[in-house]
Amino acid sequence: MLAEIRAKSEAGKRLDRADGLFLLTEASLLDLGALAQEARFRRHPEKQVSFVIDSNPNYTNVCITDCQFCAFYRRPGDAEAWTLTVEQVLEKVESAFRGGATTVLLQGGHNPALPLDYYLSLVTETRRRFPQVTPHFFTASEIMTMADVSGLGMPDVLARLKAAGQTTLPGGGAEVLSERVRRRIEPKKGGPRAWLDVHREAHRQGFKSTATMMYGHVETPEDILDHFDSIRELQDEHGGFTAFVPWSFKPGNTLLEKWIKTYKGPNAYLRMLAASRLYLDNFPHVQASWFSEGKRAGQVALHWGADDFGGTLFEENVHAAADYVNKTTVDEIVTLIREAGFTPVQRTTEYEVLKIY
Amino acid sequence: MLAASPAPPVIRDSRLAPVWDKVQGGIRLSREDGLLLFETEDLHAVGRMANFVKSRLHGEQVFFVLNRYVNPTNVCVLSCSFCDFARKKGEEGAFENSIEDVLDMIKPGTREAHIVGGHHPDWPFDYYERMIGAIHAARPETQIKAFTAAEIDYLWRRWKIEPREALARLKKAGLHSMPGGGAEIFSKRLSKELHYSGKADADRWLEIHGIAHSLGIKTNATMLYGHIETMAERVEHLVRLREQQDKSGGFLTFIPLAYQVGTTKLVPRQTPPTDDLRTIAASRLMLDNFPHIEAYWIMIGEETASVALHFGASDVNGTLEDEKIAHAALAESPPGLAQEQILRMIRDAGKVPVERDALYNVVKIWN
């Protein structure tokens, strides 16, 4: 089976679900890594690993969606609920900019009290004041919230954000794109279509975006293959995904913690990265992270098909709410990539090279 | 896939093909093969070959022990450049435990006590002998793994007790096995440069383990890597251990020890996890006569140790309650893990946890 998969991958033939299932459940972890590296070097022959200088602030933790995996949100009216003004968010953008960030990944809860103008101002003002910073703002479900509060359709919301200067969308909120999983852990967020439709429309309008996956809770390998299949099919339509970014669910302080006590370890992470590199044949980049599984596991992950090391994440609040904290600096990222045997490359949100170290 | 007919590994560096042939045929690897294992960029193939050997020996099983670390003293006459643990007598932070203190540290029911310490200038041999005797009397259920070859050699230097006599008397007092520390790296160049030339050298360290083996005392072996040693020095170290094992056969486990930068800072940063994985795999392949290779989570971290179970490691040491030496050098791992966490480290890698005693007798196979 492994030899067949290797031959298919070499010939540029698409892997089917049986192949995917084998990679996710049976393949030896090291053979999987070897095949993923072959596929990675066919696409990116240079021994380089890219990263972005970025920050992940949030504009509100108010949310009405009650996802079971989330430790970050608070219901409207909760004593710990907060929402920043446009100026307060811009201060965070400025602070990221001063730290050298070229990307600000901004996301927040689904707060029905915020009007569409609030979001549009965030984009306009970021572009106006900090032209070097790409506003990588708002996940699919936030776009749907804007559509709801404004009464405009989702395509119109995207068009207005684009007119305000937004060119990319972060891929969060996908979790696992499977009806079964989403009904169980995020029943109010809609099925896989809700996320896929926003990205399809965004790509159609010329946005670039990423696809993420948060695994390690109630999903089965079949659910993961559903996820892979949907984003691979969508990528065939417009090619708007830059990267696939998986991470493991962190159960601290979430409703799911009652059933799931610990997060999946590094072996599952390596398997996920390598399987995605082989299966998602039309994705340019696969992102490993120093952040989500630890710095040393992140270094190992660069040998399991990933060609990108994510961002510096100067500010991060969502994992932190689950009591998972990990910090770094640009210098440390450069060192970690070098130690793993690669040349560090600083990139933009859209993976253009800024600096080769 | 059937365990009986494992698929061949994916080999991207063709120079490894002849090594794979040897590994399959059970043919001993040469020094040149060893160097290649450390130098090739094909980390996966090295790991995969090591995993083949590990699976042939132990299937999917990975061993651990519920153990406790005991350091009778950190007072030491040596000044090894890589050590953050040792103190001079009277220096701040120096400690000297009484036999009662040591007994207090070993809770009833402890499966294994791992006892190592500094080279104390004044403690006579009979103090060590009484300590072992007292532990054995108070905790007959505890297996005592005590004193490195370096300490045994020091007892000769200081008190002129021949190692054979020392070990025979300690065994009689209740010693079960010997830890593998104090080997550092077998290199005259490094023993001078890193100031451990006052300690048992390679010949002496190996001689003492040979004596222990002849007395029926099983031992472990270590190698301190990831500082300023060369790959050739690592290979030489492994070859020396392999030769000794051919002669005396009493080594149970080889434990590669990743140098902890701490405050000694021989290098700016700890060696990366890819080097840990490679070193474990290369050791598994070179040490064809060693039953086990260990992923020592205290020094390489739990994540890397878990991944190392695919790179030929068949043991994760144990719970290591109250570990002090790596933590004196600011190791980032927690000072001891609950059994639960050890099980998770093994299960995350898809392996079967097997609780063992100090001599690798199976206590319990966990499902």
Image (cartoon, rainbow, N blue to C red):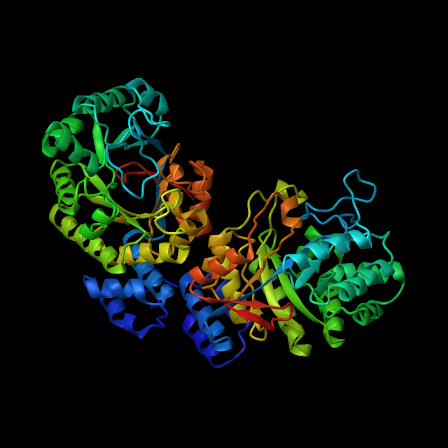
Residue displayed at 24% across by 28% down:
B120
Residue displayed at 67% across by 43% down:
A255
Measured as percent of width and height from the top left, residue B177 is found at: 22, 35
Along the line of sight, the residue nearer the viewer: A122 or A65:
A122
Measured as percent of width and height from the top left, residue A8 is found at: 48, 78
Along the line of sight, the residue nearer the viewer: B156 or A113:
B156
Task: Report the residue that reaches farthest toward the top.
Answer: B100
Asked whether, in this view, residue A291 is left or right of residue B135, the answer is right
The answer to which image quadrant residue A212 occupies is bottom right
Along the line of sight, the residue nearer the viewer: A93 or A252:
A93
Task: Report the residue that reaches farthest toward the bottom.
Answer: A11
Can residue B274 be seen here? yes
Residue displayed at 83% across by 69% down:
A160
Q: Is residue A251 above or below residue A30?
A: above
Q: How many tags in the picture?
A: 0
Measured as percent of width and height from the top left, residue A353 is found at: 58, 72
The answer to which image quadrant residue B94 occupies is top left
Can residue B108 be seen here? no
Q: Is residue A308 above or below residue B229?
A: below
Asked whether, in this view, residue A327 is left or right of residue B320, the answer is right
Q: Quadrant of the N terminus of chain A?
A: bottom left
Measured as percent of width and height from the top left, residue B152 is found at: 17, 34
